[in-house]
Image (spheres, rainbow, N blue to C red):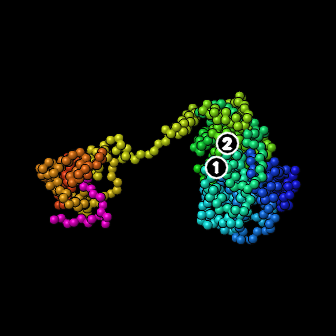
Amino acid sequence: MSFSDLGLSEPILRAVTSEGYENPTPIQAQSIPHVMAGRDLLGCAQTGTGKTAAFALPILHRLTAEGNPPPGSGRKIRVLVLAPTRELALQISESFSSYGRNTPLRNTVIFGGVGQGNQVKALQRGVDILIATPGRLNDLMDQGYINLAQLQIFVLDEADRMLDIGFLPDIRRVMAKLPKVRQTLFFSATMPPEVRKLADDLLHQPAKVEIAPVKATADLIDQSVVHIPKAKKTRLLAAFLKQPGVDRSIVFARTKHGADRIARQLLRYGIRAEAIHGNKSQNARQRTLDRFRIGKLRVLLATDLAARGIDVDNITHVFNFDLPHEPETYVHRIGRTGRAGSAGKAIAFCDPAERSMLKGIERLTRKSIPVLEELPEPPEVTPEEQALIDEFAAEEEAFADGVGIHRPVRDGRRRHEEGERSEGGPGRSQGTGGPPRRGNRRRRPGGTGPAGSGPGGPGAHRPPREGRPVGAQAGAESTGGQTAPVGEPGQARGPGRGPGRPHGRPGGRPYGGGGGGGGSGGASRGPWQPGPGTAGGEGRGPRRPPRKGGPRRPRGRG
């Protein structure tokens, strides 16, 4: 069967021929007639079998048959395609542009991680086909930039992955705004129960197409496994990557942190590798993919979510540096190689903690993965390089266990928690170990003396509360009823308690004129004189909460 036998229009056939396609894949041959007839479709096919063309070609055929769209902003969104990742959305958009190059149809793609300005301008110019990720789609709909009232076809691609990453609430929000009368195309690589339930809610008497169940991996992929401790994986990976024939390879890591760490370690062996994952900006991810696609980058590090949108030909090797928790993910990973009838190799590294994951993969595929006996010679490294590699491995293990996560602690808080004494100085008490106060206190004009030591002390600018003893009277209270002469140090009434306050600050600096570490009583300046403290240090004056109307202006002496 050829594409011309499917009844596609002549402009689309010319575009397909220019892309080098000769015969449709099984899912394309079975899906295209149903979509052209207007039926809902439930498609389940393994990654790399041509699902994008299976819905893009018949959609372009149907829109072209309806006639030319209105010019300019008069175009209405007639097709909506939802994809889980930015990379997959861009890939679908490129496919629509390639297959529809001979048609007047216009498509655009919107996704998060970048500014929405250019995307909004493209929508305002008018589009026929919109490819979007769920989060950005809901944002722009809430802002009123997207109207789906004229929608005819709704496509949900990679539905299983959308549910895995928690997009179900966003999908439900989109479903609530779709027209009741529409055609829905539902594609998924796997069909767990929750995906099937979502399909039942979306589809109406759908045609079902199931090609190459996920339990059968591609026969053209040579699979093998190496049992190796985790600390030695990077060195073995470097040995494989330096072998001839490893021209373009993808290395899968379980975490974003792990992907970055592997890239740094490979650089020690003289191998340049770059990582793509959710923490990278969209522009950085796209630049890395472009370099990988044109051959300027041989090794690509990826996490499972970011790899869903990788559509690169001639990938020779796939390395599973970390085995996935879900066996189905293994099938998606190795599906990056062995595409379009070409052969590929998939090598998995399995440490003792991952044996159960390996057994789950073998149960799913119903195939025992052979152990690779002939391993390449590990590259020679200097003792300094080996020490750095071991340090990276230790950091990764500490990060995984949680012991390598350090939270910064302010110096003052640490001194307070450990009970250390501060060094003492202007504005600090010497014997309490409390944290230093924040901010600069307003000083009274006319003096610059240290805290609690004279007319310019910081305690001198605040008026006393009613009933608070001041001057010599405060000294009498603090010394047990005997009046302390002006200029001589008094004694605090108790640890952590200063004159004029009923309670001290527990574990911290006292509230009084000196307290705790103490501050010598200076010359009296009337009602603003701070209470005397204990001898042997410098302290603060009385402190009070600010008034609602702002700080009170100091009153004159009298």
Q: Which is closer to the viewer, label 2 or label 1?
A: 1
Residue at 74%, 48% in the rendered image: 44
**Which of the two residues, 366 or 377, is positioned nearer the viewer here?**
366
Nearer the observer, 40 or 405: 40
What residue would you read off at disc 2?
Answer: 329
- Determine the CA span between mark 2 and mark 1: 14 Å
Q: Is residue 62 visible?
A: yes
Q: Position of residue 93 (x, y in %)?
A: 72, 57
The spot of residue 280 in percent (x, y) is 60, 51
- Where residue 461 sits, quadrant-wise, is bottom left
Farthest residue to the front: give it: 205
Instruction: Tell me residue 51's x, y (percent).
Output: 76, 51
The crowding category of the residue bearing disc 2, from other C-alpha atoms within 10 Å (few below 14, some 14 to 19, many at least 20), is: some
What SS does tag 2 mark?
Answer: helix
Residue 279 belongs to magenta span: no
On the image, the x and y values in percent for residue 271 come to 65, 41
Look at the image and give the residue range highlighted in magenta.
539-558
As rendered, which of 537 and 358 lies closer to the eye?
358
